[in-house]
Image (cartoon, grey):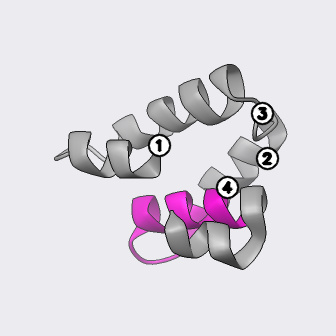
């Protein structure tokens, strides 16, 4: 799923947030809405916010291997 987002999302990083919510929260249920908001907040506090947002989501879902894969 993160590979698909990486291949499709060129340009607007804010689109990543909508894709992540649709897939991770609504479709798969891997994150709650609160976790998704926390992940976005973490991503906004660090350099490279959208890459960091995907990495933080992977970490929440599957610890270090999930963050590495995302």
Identify the magenta region.
42-59
| Image disc number at residue 1 | 1
First in sequence: mark 2 or mark 1? 1
Farthest residue in the left direction? Answer: 11
Quick check: is 55 in the magenta stretch? yes
| Image disc number at residue 39 | 4
- x, y percent for residue 12: 24, 43
Q: Are marks 2 and 3 in contact (CB under 8 Å)?
A: yes
Q: Are marks 1 and 3 in contact (CB under 8 Å)?
A: no
Instruction: Report whether 29 appears left or right of 44.
Output: right
Asked whether the viewer can see residue 44, the reply is no
Q: Are marks 2 and 1 in contact (CB under 8 Å)?
A: no
Secondary structure, mark 4, is helix
Instruction: Report whether 4 appears left or right of 57.
Output: left
Q: Nearer the viewer, residue 12 or 56?
A: 56
Asked whether the viewer can see residue 32, the reply is yes
Secondary structure, mark 1, is loop
Q: Disc 4 and disc 1: Cα gap in Å? A: 17 Å
Q: Are marks 3 and 4 in contact (CB under 8 Å)?
A: no
Helix, strand or loop: magenta stretch = helix
Q: Are marks 2 and 4 in contact (CB under 8 Å)?
A: yes
- Residue shown at the point (61%, 52%) measured from the top left: 40
Near mark 2 (Cα within 10 A), the count class, few <14, some 14-19 or many ≥20, is some
Q: Disc 3 and disc 4: Cα gap in Å? A: 10 Å
- x, y percent for residue 4: 34, 42
Secondary structure, mark 3, is helix
Near mark 3 (Cα within 10 A), the count class, few <14, some 14-19 or many ≥20, is some
Secondary structure, mark 2, is helix
Read off the residue under disc 2: 35
Read off the residue under disc 3: 33
């Amino acid at each position: 799923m993160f590979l698909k987002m990486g291949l499709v999302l060129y340009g607007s990083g804010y689109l990543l947030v909508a894709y992540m919510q649709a897939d991770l929260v609504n479709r798969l249920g891997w994150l709650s809405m609160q976790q998704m908001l926390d992940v976005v907040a973490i991503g906004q506090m660090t350099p490279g916010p959208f890459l960091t947002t995907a990495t933080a989501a992977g970490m929440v879902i599957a610890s270090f291997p999930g963050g590495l894969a995302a």
